[in-house]
Amino acid sequence: MMASLSLRMAVGRTLLTVAAVLIVVWSVAPFLWQVSTAFQEDRLLTAATPSLLPSPPTLDHLANIFGEKQFQLYIVNSTIVAGSTALICLAIGAAAAFALARLRMRNRFGILSVILSVSMFPQIAIVAPLYLIAAAAGLMNTYTVLIIIYVALGLPLVIWVLFGYFQTIPLEIDEAATMDGAGPLRLLVSVIVPMSLPGFVTTGLLAFIMAWNEFMFALSFTSGIKRQTIPVGIANFTNLYYVPWGDIAAASVVVTLPLVVLVLIFQRYIIEGLTQGAVKE
Amino acid sequence: MAAVTLKSVSKSYGLAKVVHGIEFAIEDGEFVVLVGPSGCGKSTLLRMIAGLEPITSGEVVIDGQIVNDIPPKYRDIAMVFQSYALYPHMTVAGNMGFALKLAGLPKAEAATRILKAAEILGLGDLLDRYPRQLSGGQRQRVAMGRAIVRDPSVFLFDEPLSNLDAALRMQMRVEIAELHQRLGTTMIYVTHDQTEAMTLADRIVVLNRGCVEQVATPIELYTRPANLFVARFIGSPPLNLAEADIAAITADSPRSTEIVLKDGTKLTVDCGYERLSVGQTVQLGIRPEALLPADDGPIAGRVQIVEPLGGLTLLHVRLDGGDTFIVQLTGAAGWRLGSPIRLKAETSGVHLFDSAGQRIPQLPDDVALLARRVGAVS
Ligand SMILES: Nc1ncnc2c1ncn2[C@@H]1O[C@H](COP(=O)(O)OP(=O)(O)OP(=O)(O)O)[C@@H](O)[C@H]1O
Ligand SMILES: [Mg+2]
């Protein structure tokens, strides 16, 4: 009995480990291939037997994208657009989620469903109308137009996640703050937001990544290196005669790094436990 | 400091009416405890006084002012919650100072007040800690500190001690009593715990299904419960109840009343009762400590369970008629299971209730009556 139980546990654990390894390989392998490609010489990339380890490794592609192709300009554009998107999403989203979660409000779930349905439009269907509006408003080729669109796209998710987060905060905290003399705004800023930092970090990162990676709208609404974002920039590398795989790979690796760094920096917030000690569970 | 008056205060959630026209007045500086079974509307009532819950009808008057439409922050009330509801991202000092900061108090004065409150509550060394670094009792104290620093005119407590273990609860109970003596502020306190209610209260309000059953001092509540509900609710172990008939009434002094239990047991108490007639069926209630073993006692039964509590012993006695009475004795007398026992009842612990459950008051006994008359003449 005992033996078979521990045997079953051992088998279960082995299967779990194998599954975990498979999933990690599945998700990391393309990225590793990308990294490897970024440091290979062009002629080796098209060799009959490609090798994972670059030999000899080269920094040509990196030099190329920053020197000749001015990739840093795209990075600046993307940082401005994605950073503003994340901040604005958080500000609007926090206010909306707070109102939905905490204030006396009629039909809050109806409102939440409408908000969610906004994110269900096929994006390709709204490119053309948005194009006309942006052109009429004189917003073509600006950061503003991208930020507005990305905020609209990102808000539903941000509101839903923050709404869920706010709901986990006990109502008695609100009431205590009310007794202490806090109005709704003070309550949001001084109590609810600090208590929801993990939720803010997570949703902020998601909104940032969404804006950082978005391609279709960026391609449609911007032209020229002054305003184009990274995905469009990488697409520009390709010309009529030639696909510079090495440069593309190098650029992809470079733009992934900030995301990794952001996640690492905020990692300690993306854990639960900030509400510990507030109320007796 | 302020008096609080409730004038036929009612509360409905949609169609469900949960508080029915509550009416009572709390004097300035008084310590009033609200008790009642779960769901009877204690918290709702407290929250209406606090302003956290709109009042459906009636008036709440604080310090002479109708506050129905005044938001909580202008009512000058502090509340201590059952779950403490501390701000987890603020230190102890931050928690206590939050209200002062919002009120725009100068930093120096706020700091002085926080220090003073911390000293009263023994939190002096913990001011820089976060709530998660505190024990349950310490968190409780911070919650009280948050109320104290504001120096409000009324304190509200909603079962503040129910999350603490027994020893700590007793300690905090004493501390709350001291706090009230020290501050002299009006306090309204909700609890399930009878001991808390009896020891802390100047007066107790007994609630049942959103109505007031009785408002009285703890002793009065215990010795003269207005009805069966209060009699059963107050007192632990609870009052022994049995149906009985009135067999005879001696109206002349010395008065006496003969009560017959359903099994034929005859009980004679040496006092009279208002509006009682021979043949009337009543509910007889006897406090456990008013039942005493006596060889010639009228009530006969057998000891079924013995619960030694140290200084006290509880006997569950099965009467020959089938009812079970609980007897509370001082000391640890050697009662055995199954041994026969005879009991007599002390008049002071015998209560009669009519068919509607209302108390039938005892006539003041003649000696006391005489004494009072003499007092009135001289
Ligand atoms: N938001 C609400 N909507 C509908 N009914 C409610 C609401 N809040 C409370 N009630 C009802 O009002 C009644 C009184 O509730 P309340 O919380 O005041 O009881 P309580 O006496 O404090 O009970 P406890 O001792 O368990 O805390 C209960 O029957 C409860 O179901
Ligand atoms: Mg309650």
Image: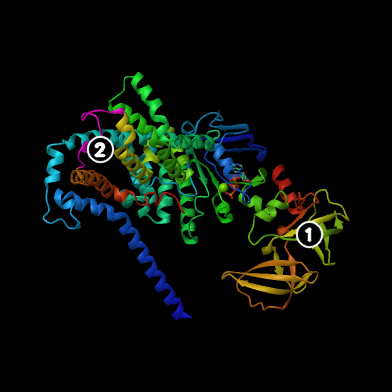
> In the figure, B124 relative to B107: above or below?
below
Query: Residue at the location (41% across, 70% down)?
Result: A12
* Magenta span contains residue B375: no
- Closer to the camera in the image, B253 or B51: B51
Residue occupied by mark 2: A235
- Camera-near label (1 vs 2) is 2
| Residue A109 relative to residue A226: left or right | right
Q: How would you classify the magenta stretch by its main secondary structure?
A: loop
Is there CB contact under 8 Å for labels 1 and 2?
A: no
Going by the numbered disc 1, the residue's amino acid type is: Asp
Q: Which residues are magenta?
A: A221-243
* Residue at x 28% of width, y 56% of height: A29
Q: Residue at x 56, y 30 (%)?
A: B68
Q: Nearer the viewer, residue A217 or A245?
A: A245
- The answer to whether B112 appears left or right of B252 in the picture is left
Q: Residues within 10 Å of mark 1 (few under 14, many from 20)?
A: some
Residue named by callout 1: B270
Mark 2 is surrounded, within 10 Å at the Cα level, by few (under 14), some (14 to 19) or many (20 or more) other residues, namely few
Please report the residue visible at 31 percent of the width from the left and 52 percent of the height from the top. B125
Mark on residue A80?
Answer: none
Q: Is residue A231 magenta?
A: yes
Q: In this orientation, does residue A212 appear?
A: yes
Q: Position of residue A139 (x, y in %)?
A: 31, 22
A231 horizontally vs A100: left or right: left
Q: Secondary structure at mark 2?
A: helix
| For residue B134, above or below residue B377 | below
Label 1 lies in what chain? B
Give B354 or A103, whichever is nearer the viewer: A103
Q: Residue furthest right?
A: B279
Which chain does the residue under circle 2 lie in? A
- Residue B248 at x, y percent in the picture: 87, 58
